[in-house]
């Protein structure tokens, strides 16, 4: 039995991950689960999967009914749980930067990480990939585009690659005029046309920052020059990304827009098992279309390329500023169009550390959050 911890088990990725795992009861044993706030769903998951331990974001005022299992609390607790458990695989479905320390901890414990989180790689991709190589941990990307790229590369060396085409559906506002952007509400922004996802990533898809973060994510996962990673808008979202090799051959990965496919591949890699998911009906899709991304309408993509090229602590600052601004936007505190504006200002003020260590990265993250909050208070 493969012993597995599902981090962020009550989120969109974690819950889908447990659906995948429950198809293979003879193969996987769930040993640990974690949630930030959804204790009720966690209680149900504990009843069904009977892990040895769980971690909850905060136990203040909570009396979880979890029977006789070990309960950890908070961010430190999550890392302690990972250290204490005996596990082979971690599925990381935690949203945002809070995945960074658990990922680094898991890299000392597991043989494989099925990684759905992109922010950890954006912040500290160099540190994560170095540690994975040193500890011989396989990182299988679960982000749908990166799972596609990983499958297309199929273990070839990175010097055989020429280009990555990172496809994106364009989000909910692809065909909305820029003049209408200032009136976009959080409810409209979280309503993605193709993928069912958590709130933060849905807003990132609406600003297209998600694609920008994915460029940096791909840069680290596939050891690729950022200038050879091209965003391509593909509204049908049938192709999940493509890879061009040196000889001009291009491979694409296609399939239904269902996260259970990349999650399952992440968990069963290198094997492929039945998923029970219906394939797309090509005759009813009829056309696949492609467009260049509009950097003027969606400035977050350009900001991400810029931060990725400058490297050092810039991507971390981009990410922290974005997380802070998106939180304010979801809470109704700022306009949709304020998101890229504030990120650009904060990046402009940053003095980066070259070849940053983890300490520099955590400091830059903290600095960017404080700066972003200061600037947002001014514009309210
Ligand atoms: Mg994605």
Image (cartoon, rainbow, N blue to C red):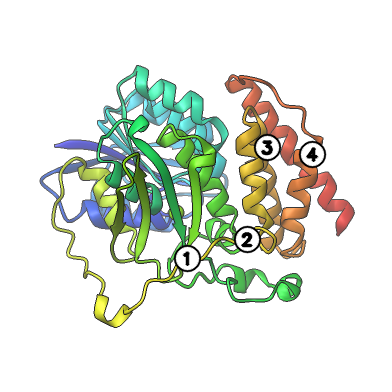
Look at the numbered discs 4 and 2 and tell me whether their residues touch, using CB distance below 8 Å: no
Q: CA distance from mark 3 to mark 2?
A: 17 Å
Look at the numbered discs 1 and 2 and tell me whether their residues touch, using CB distance below 8 Å: no
Q: Residue at x 67, y 34 (%)?
A: 314
Extreme-left residue of the structure: 26
Q: Residue at x 54, y 61 (%)?
A: 292
Q: CA distance from mark 1 to mark 4?
A: 29 Å
- Left or right: residue 190 versus residue 270 is right
- Left or right: residue 29 versus residue 107 is left
Look at the numbered discs 3 and 1 and tell me whether their residues touch, using CB distance below 8 Å: no
Label 1 vs 2, first from the N-terminus: 1
SS label for mark 3: helix
The quadrant of the image that shows the N terminus is top left
Q: How busy is the neighbourhood of tag 1: few (under 14 within 10 Å), some, or many (20 plus)?
A: many
Label 4: which residue? 348
Label 3: which residue? 317
Label 3 vs 1, first from the N-terminus: 1
Label 2: which residue? 207
Extreme-bottom residue of the structure: 284
Label 4 vs 2, first from the N-terminus: 2
Label 1 vs 4, first from the N-terminus: 1
Q: Residue at x 59, y 64 (%)?
A: 206
- Left or right: residue 270 versus residue 333 is left
Q: CA distance from mark 4 to mark 2?
A: 20 Å
């Amino acid at each position: 039995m493969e012993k597995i911890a599902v981090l962020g088990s009550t989120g969109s990725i974690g819950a889908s991950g447990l659906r995948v795992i429950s198809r293979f009861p003879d193969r996987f044993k769930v040993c640990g689960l974690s949630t930030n706030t959804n204790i009720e769903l966690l209680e149900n998951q504990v009843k069904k999967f009977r892990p040895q331990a769980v971690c909850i974001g905060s136990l203040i005022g909570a009396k979880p009914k979890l029977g006789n299992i070990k309960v950890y609390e908070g961010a430190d607790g999550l890392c302690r749980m990972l250290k204490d458990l005996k596990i082979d695989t971690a599925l990381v479905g935690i949203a945002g930067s809070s995945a960074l320390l658990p990922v680094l901890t898991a890299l000392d414990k597991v043989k494989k990480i099925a990684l759905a989180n992109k922010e950890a790689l954006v912040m500290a991709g160099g540190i994560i990939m170095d540690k994975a190589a040193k500890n011989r941990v396989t990182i299988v990307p679960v982000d749908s585009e990166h799972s596609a790229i990983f499958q297309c590369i199929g273990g070839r060396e990175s010097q055989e690659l020429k280009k990555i085409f990172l496809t994106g559906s364009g989000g909910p506002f692809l065909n909305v005029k820029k003049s209408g952007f200032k009136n976009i509400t959080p409810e409209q922004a979280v309503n993605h046309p193709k993928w069912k996802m958590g709130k933060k990533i849905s807003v990132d898809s609406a600003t297209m920052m998600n694609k920008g973060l994915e460029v940096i994510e791909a840069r680290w996962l596939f050891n690729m020059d950022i200038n050879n990673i091209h965003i391509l808008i593909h509204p049908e979202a049938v192709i999940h990304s493509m890879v061009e090799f040196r000889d001009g051959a291009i491979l694409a990965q296609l399939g239904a827009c269902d996260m259970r496919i990349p999650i399952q591949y992440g968990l069963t890699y290198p094997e492929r098992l039945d998923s029970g998911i219906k394939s797309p009906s090509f005759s009813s899709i009829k056309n696949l279309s492609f467009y260049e991304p509009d950097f003027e309408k969606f400035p977050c993509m350009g900001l991400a390329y810029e931060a990725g090229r400058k490297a050092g602590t810039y991507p971390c600052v981009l990410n922290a500023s974005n997380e802070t601004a998106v939180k304010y936007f979801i809470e109704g505190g700022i306009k949709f169009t304020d998101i890229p504006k504030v990120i650009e200002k904060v990046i402009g003020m940053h003095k980066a550390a070259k070849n940053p260590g983890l300490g520099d990265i955590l400091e830059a993250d903290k600095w960017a959050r404080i700066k972003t909050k200061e600037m947002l208070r001014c514009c309210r």
